[in-house]
Amino acid sequence: MTGLLVALCCGGFAVVNVIFEVTGRFDGGPYAAYASGLLVMNWLVVVLKLVGAGAALSSIAGRPAILPPAVLGVVLWSAFALLSLYVLGAVGQAFGMALGLMGSAGQITLAGVGYVLFFTLMAVGFGALAISYSRRFEIRKGLIALGVLGGPVALGLILLAAPMLLTALGVMPAA
């Protein structure tokens, strides 16, 4: 059940990015100069979210997935670590706002709290899938550590390198 819910959440959240593109959300306004680059980044994010959905579904499949068990184990732990880090950052930001260190407590909205709760549930879901999968397929601790440490670093590098490449190719403005 957890795997299905996590996959549905990943797929549903990917639809948000598709809607951004279908509606031309970034074609005008303050992001208009970045529209072409945001198009590429939006589709990259859609692919990453669909990979998350595929990993969640693969982790509950009765037979080994397309990926070797060790690779899928690393992917699951990566997703768990990445989402957990994202939630910790959002909660830290909220505490900073509540304490008046950045922004103000009035900027904390019900929608924002719901967003963080959604990602918290996603992190918990991927954590449960990662633990269960690791136990079933006896994923080694070194591979778990690779996922926990490597996933957020790899995604950070992708999300830094992609805009830099798009800027170098002239798809996005330099500033």
Image (cartoon, helix red, strand yellow):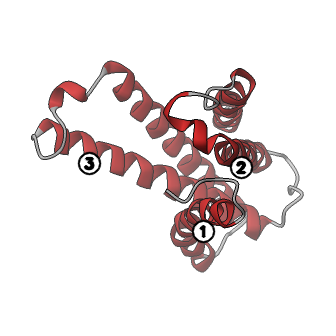
At 89% from the left edge and 58% from the top edge, which residue is drawn? 66
Label 1 Cα crowd, 10 Å radius (few <14 / some 14-19 / many 20+): some
Which residue is disc 1 drawn over? 154
The earlier-in-sequence mark between 2 and 1 is: 2
Among the two numbered marks 3 and 1 on one chain, the one whose residue lies closer to the N terminus = 3
Residue drawn at x 27%, y 45% as measured from the top left: 93
Give the amino acid at mark 3: Gly
Q: Which mark is residue 33?
A: none
- Give the x, y percent position of residue 81: 50, 58
Q: Local crowd at mark 3 within 10 Å, few (<14), some, or many (≥20)?
A: few
Position above or below: 104 against 101:
above
* Residue holding disc 2: 44
Residue that label 3 marks:
92
Q: Nearer the viewer, mark 2 or mark 1?
A: 2
Q: Secondary structure at mark 1?
A: helix
Q: Nearer the viewer, residue 78 or 48?
A: 48
User: How far apart are labels 2 and 1 at the CA level?
Assistant: 14 Å
Question: How far across and down, in percent of the image, does residue 146 sit?
Answer: 58, 75
Instruction: Look at the picture and state if 94 lies above or below 156.
Output: above
Q: Secondary structure at mark 2?
A: helix
